[in-house]
C-alpha cells in the first residue's frame, strides 16, 4: 500500500497561491476525500509534484484513473497550471520541480472531454464507462446534497477570484503592476504609472511624447517649444514673422550688414584697380579709407555687380542699402579715436602682429598701417623686382598691391577686415545679446530688438536666406546649376538679385569652399555650411516663438545658446580650415621655388597671395569668446590663448622669400635652410590648429 500525503503550499511558503490553485484545492480535496473513503489513504512527508505522485500511484494500481482525474479537471476548470501543489513522499525526493498537472487549454468542458475520450484506447474506454458512475458520485453527482466546498467569488469569470483580481468586473484584465488604473494587458507601459498609451508606437508614451501622432523616438525638439521637429518642422530657409508688424510681416532685417559686406567688396576692387601714381599717396589713402569711415557713402554709388552680370537691388547708392554705415565703427577695439566697439577686444588685448605697431595696438591701427604702406607703394614711382630662374634680368612684380618683402596688402586688408569686423561683431557682439530681456519692439519695426541682433549676426556671416538650397560648388561660386552657379539665386523670380537676401557673401562662401574637399571615396569631410546655417535658422525660430509669447523660457534660452555656440564654432572652424588651406598652399609655393630664385612670376605672386590670406584670417581667431583657443585649458601642452599666440608667431609678419629673407632680414644660413626651417614652423602651427579644432588629419593634410 502506498503511503502518500497530498497538501497545498501555504501563502507564506516558497510558492504563492493564485486563483486557479484555490479552485483546484476544492476539487482535489473532494477527490481525495472520496479516494480515502474507498480505501486509498496513508501519506508521508517529502515534497513531490502532484501529477508525478498521482501518476506513480495510479500506474501501479488503477491505470485508468488518470483519465478519470482529467475528466474531473475538465468539469471543474478551463485551463490548469498549478505549480504550487505538492505531494510529500519520502521515497521520491529526487523529483524537485513542480510542473503542469494537466496542461492543455480548454474553453468548455465538452471540448475538453471530447479531446480526452478520443485519445483513449478501446480497453480504457470500457473501463472508463464502468467507473464513470463512481466518479460522478465522487464529484457530488447523483441526488442529494453536494460535498464540494463553496468556491471564491469570481464576478467576471476569468478564473481569478474577486479578492485577488485588480479588475473583478473585466474578464480581460486581472493585474495592474504600476497601479495606474490600466490593466497590464491594455497598458503599453505596464511598469510606468505615468504612461499607458503609445498612439504612434514609437516607444514614447503619449503623456510625454512631443509628437503624439507622429513617430519620433529621438524626441528632437530643436526650438524647445514642446513640439518635436517631426510634427513641428524647422524651416529650411532663414525666415521669421515680425509680430509687431501687420499679420505675417517679415521679421528679418540686416541691411546694415549687407552694406558693410558691399563696402568691403568695393574696397577690394579699389585696391585691385590701383596703378602706380607717383606723388599721390595722400589721395590714395583717402580713396581707400573712404570704405573704412563711410564718410559720404550714403550718396555714393556702390557699383556692386554680380559675376554673371545680373542686375542687383537695392541701389544705386550705399544709402539705398542702409544709411550711415561704415567699418571703423564696428571693428573690434574701436575706431582709434575712442569710439566704436572699444569693448570688443577679448581681455582688452590685440596680438599677433609686431612689425610697425606700438606696444598696445588696435586692429584699426593695423588696417590703417597697411593702407598707408599700400599708398606709399603705389605712389613712390618704384616698381619692385624679383629674381626668376632662367631670367637674365630681374622681373617686375607688376602691381603696387605687393611689397618687396612679399606683403600682399589687398589680401591682408580684405581678410583681416572680414574677421575684425564681421566675425568679431557676429560672435562677440550680436550673438552675445541678452535675448531674454530684448523681446520688446525695436523702435517702430516689426521685430524685437533681440531678434534684430540675431539677424545682424546672420548678416555678418553672409549667407543667402535659402543657403540650404545651394550645393557647395554653387555657394562657393564655383559652378553647378546655371541659376545658382555664381553664388546667388533669384529666389523670388523678379529678375533681380536682392543682395540683402539672395547673395552669398564672405564667410558663408568661404565655408562652402572648405566643404568642397572630398575624401578618397568622394565623400565630403565636413559640411560647415549647413551646420552653421541650420544653427542660425533654428536660433531664429526660437526667438520668433519668444517674441510671439513675449517670454524666452529657460528651456528655450538653453536651446538658443546651444545653437549660438554651434553657429559660432562652425563659422570659426571654417576660418581655421581656411588658414590651414593657405598654410598648405604656402608650403607648396615654397616647394616650387628654385632658391634663391622663383620658378616664375606666378610663383612669387601666389606665395604672397596665399601668405596674406593665411595671416589675415589667422589674426581673426582671437575674436570669438567661444573659440577653443579661449576655452581649452591646453593646446599642444600650453595654455589655449598662448597656443594661438604661438601659431601667429610661427607665421611671422612676412613670408620667407626665395632668397631666404623674411621681412627684409637676410637668413643666417642658406636660402634652402631658411625655407626648410619656415616650413617646419608652418607645420607646427598647422598641428596646433588641428588639435584645437579636433580636425580630421586626412583633411588637414590636403586642404
Image (tube, rainbow, N blue to C red):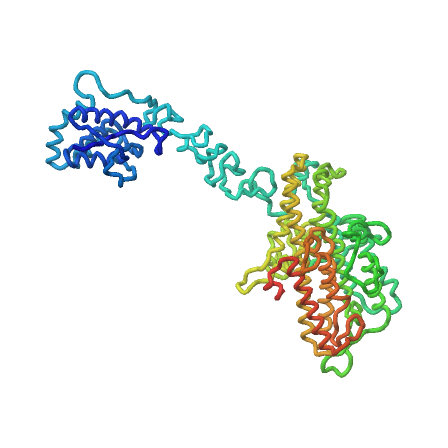
Write down the quadrant of residue 557 in the picture.
top right
Asked if residue 473 can be seen in this view, the reply is no
Asked if residue 376 can be seen in this view, the reply is yes
Viewer-proximal residue among 279 and 677? 677
Tag count = 0
Residue 672 location (% of width, % of height): 71, 77
Residue 420 lies left or right of residue 486; in this view the side is right
Image point (31%, 29%), residue name: 20
Image point (74%, 77%), residue name: 671
Viewer-proximal residue among 547 and 41? 41
Residue 356 lies left or right of residue 643; in this view the side is right
Residue 66 location (% of width, % of height): 19, 33
Viewer-proximal residue among 653 and 294? 653
Residue 110 location (% of width, % of height): 21, 29
Residue 542 lies left or right of residue 95; in this view the side is right
Residue 309 lies left or right of residue 149; in this view the side is right
Residue 535 location (% of width, % of height): 63, 48
Q: Quadrant of the C terminus?
A: bottom right
Vertical comparison of 163 with 66: above or below: above
Q: Quadrant of the N terminus?
A: top left
Amino acid at each position: 500500500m502506498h503511503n502518500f500525503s497530498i497538501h497545498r503550499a501555504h501563502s507564506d511558503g516558497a510558492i504563492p497561491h493564485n486563483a486557479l490553485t484555490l479552485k483546484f484545492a476544492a476539487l482535489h480535496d473532494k477527490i481525495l476525500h472520496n479516494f480515502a473513503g474507498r480505501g486509498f489513504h496513508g501519506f508521508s512527508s517529502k515534497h513531490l509534484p502532484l501529477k508525478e505522485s498521482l501518476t506513480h500511484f495510479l500506474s501501479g494500481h488503477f491505470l485508468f484513473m488518470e483519465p478519470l482525474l482529467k475528466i474531473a479537471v475538465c468539469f471543474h476548470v478551463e485551463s490548469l497550471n498549478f505549480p504550487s501543489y505538492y505531494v510529500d513522499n519520502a521515497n521520491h525526493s529526487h523529483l524537485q520541480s513542480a510542473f503542469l498537472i494537466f496542461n492543455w487549454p480548454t474553453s468548455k468542458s465538452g471540448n475538453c472531454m471530447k479531446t480526452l475520450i478520443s485519445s483513449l484506447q478501446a480497453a480504457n474506454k470500457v473501463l472508463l464507462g464502468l467507473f464513470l458512475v463512481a466518479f460522478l458520485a465522487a464529484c457530488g453527482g447523483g441526488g442529494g446534497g453536494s460535498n464540494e466546498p463553496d468556491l471564491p467569488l469570481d464576478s467576471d469569470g476569468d478564473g481569478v477570484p474577486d479578492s485577488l483580481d485588480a479588475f473583478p468586473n473585466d474578464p480581460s484584465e486581472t493585474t495592474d503592476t504600476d497601479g495606474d488604473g490600466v490593466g497590464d494587458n491594455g497598458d503599453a507601459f505596464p511598469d510606468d504609472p505615468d504612461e499607458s498609451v503609445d498612439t504612434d508606437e514609437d516607444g514614447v508614451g503619449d503623456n510625454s511624447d512631443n509628437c503624439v501622432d507622429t513617430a519620433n523616438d529621438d524626441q528632437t525638439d530643436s526650438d524647445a517649444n514642446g513640439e518635436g521637429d517631426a510634427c513641428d518642422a524647422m524651416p529650411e530657409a532663414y525666415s521669421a514673422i515680425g509680430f509687431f508688424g501687420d499679420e505675417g510681416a517679415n521679421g528679418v532685417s540686416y541691411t546694415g550688414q549687407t552694406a558693410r559686406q558691399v563696402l568691403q567688396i568695393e574696397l577690394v576692387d579699389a585696391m585691385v584697380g590701383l596703378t602706380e601714381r607717383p606723388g599721390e599717396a595722400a589721395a590714395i589713402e583717402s580713396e581707400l579709407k573712404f570704405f573704412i569711415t563711410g564718410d559720404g557713402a550714403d550718396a555714393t554709388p556702390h557699383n556692386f555687380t554680380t559675376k554673371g552680370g545680373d542686375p542687383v537691388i537695392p541701389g544705386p547708392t550705399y544709402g539705398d542699402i542702409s544709411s550711415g554705415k561704415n567699418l571703423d565703427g564696428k571693428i573690434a577695439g574701436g575706431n582709434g579715436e575712442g569710439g566704436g566697439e572699444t569693448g570688443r577686444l577679448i581681455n582688452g588685448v590685440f596680438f599677433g602682429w609686431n612689425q610697425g605697431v606700438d606696444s598696445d595696438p588696435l586692429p584699426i591701427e593695423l588696417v590703417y598701417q597697411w593702407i598707408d604702406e599700400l599708398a606709399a607703394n603705389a605712389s613712390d614711382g618704384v616698381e619692385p623686382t624679383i629674381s626668376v630662374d632662367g631670367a637674365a634680368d630681374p622681373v617686375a612684380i607688376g602691381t603696387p598691391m605687393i611689397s618687396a618683402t612679399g606683403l600682399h596688402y589687398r589680401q591682408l586688408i580684405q581678410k583681416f577686415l572680414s574677421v575684425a569686423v564681421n566675425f568679431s561683431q557676429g560672435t562677440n557682439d550680436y550673438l552675445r545679446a541678452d535675448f531674454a530681456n530684448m523681446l520688446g519692439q525695436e523702435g517702430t519695426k516689426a521685430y524685437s530688438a533681440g531678434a534684430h541682433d540675431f539677424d545682424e549676426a546672420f548678416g555678418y556671416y553672409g549667407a543667402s536666406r535659402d543657403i540650404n538650397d545651394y550645393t557647395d560648388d554653387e555657394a562657393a561660386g564655383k559652378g553647378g546649376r546655371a541659376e545658382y552657379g555664381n553664388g546667388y539665386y533669384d529666389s523670388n523670380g523678379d529678375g533681380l538679385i536682392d543682395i540683402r537676401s539672395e547673395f552669398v557673401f564672405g564667410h558663408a562662401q568661404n565655408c562652402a569652399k572648405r566643404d568642397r574637399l572630398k575624401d578618397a571615396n568622394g565623400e565630403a569631410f565636413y559640411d560647415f555650411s549647413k551646420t552653421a546655417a541650420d544653427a542660425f535658422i533654428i536660433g531664429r525660430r526660437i526667438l520668433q516663438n519668444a517674441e510671439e509669447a513675449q517670454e524666452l523660457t529657460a528651456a528655450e534660452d538653453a536651446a538658443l545658446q546651444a545653437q549660438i555656440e554651434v553657429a559660432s564654432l562652425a563659422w570659426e572652424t571654417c576660418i581655421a580650415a581656411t588658414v590651414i588651406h593657405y598654410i598648405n598652399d604656402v608650403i607648396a609655393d615654397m616647394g616650387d621655388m628654385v632658391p634663391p630664385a622663383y620658378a616664375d612670376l606666378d610663383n612669387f605672386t601666389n606665395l604672397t597671395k596665399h601668405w596674406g590670406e593665411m595671416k589675415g584670417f589667422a589674426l581673426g581667431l582671437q575674436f570669438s569668446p567661444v573659440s577653443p583657443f579661449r576655452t581649452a585649458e591646453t593646446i599642444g601642452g600650453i595654455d589655449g590663448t598662448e597656443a594661438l599666440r604661438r601659431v601667429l608667431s610661427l607665421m611671422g609678419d612676412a613670408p620667407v622669400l626665395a632668397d631666404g629673407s623674411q621681412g627684409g632680414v637676410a637668413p643666417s644660413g642658406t636660402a634652402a635652410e631658411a625655407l626648410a626651417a619656415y616650413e617646419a614652423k608652418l607645420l607646427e602651427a598647422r598641428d596646433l590648429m588641428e588639435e584645437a579644432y579636433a580636425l580630421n588629419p586626412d583633411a588637414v593634410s590636403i586642404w
